[in-house]
Amino acid sequence: MHFDTPNGALAFIKEHSIEGDIIKDPYQERVIHVSSKMMGENFGEVITYIYGMIDDSSEKMLAASRALKVNANTLVKFMKDPYAIAPNTRDKIVENLPKVEQAVKLIG
């Protein structure tokens, strides 16, 4: 059985006079952590914006990576899977996103 809190499990054990131990389900904790991490963070729009700005140009990709203050490999990794890079790097990319348009326009 799954309980929301350890106190709920203890109450059930006392109520039904059950002997045994409470075992945490590591999968359940992992699911809760991942879902809370992804709540409110929609990087799809950011990735679409960057793709639209670079337009399959390696020069524009380098300019965008400089504007975002990350290296090109990190930017590629972010565009493939935003959660594959460190959270502070994701924050840096989102924070510097307004600078991408200006940097790409200088390239042409």
Image (cartoon, rainbow, N blue to C red):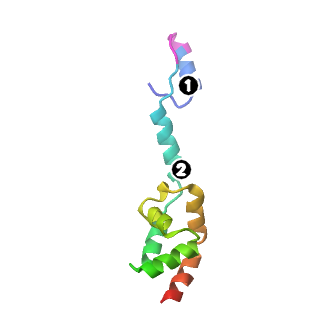
The residue pinned by badge 2 equals 37
Q: Is residue 81 left or right of residue 97?
A: left
Q: Nearer the viewer, mark 2 or mark 1?
A: 2
Badge 2 local density, few (<14 within 10 Å), some, or many (20+)?
Answer: few
Q: Which residues are magenta?
A: 14-21
Q: Is residue 21 above or below residue 45?
A: above
Give the mark nearer the N terminus: 2 vs 1: 1
Badge 1 local density, few (<14 within 10 Å), some, or many (20+)?
Answer: few
The residue pinned by badge 1 equals 8
Residue 6 lies in magenta, yes or no? no
User: What type is the residue that disc 2 sits on?
Assistant: Lys
Q: What residue do we see at 59% from left, 62% from top?
A: 91
State the image coordinates of residue 49 (x, y, percent, origin top left): 47, 74
Q: Is residue 14 above or below residue 30?
A: above
Q: What residue do we see at 51% from left, 57% from top?
A: 85
Q: Is residue 23 visible?
A: yes
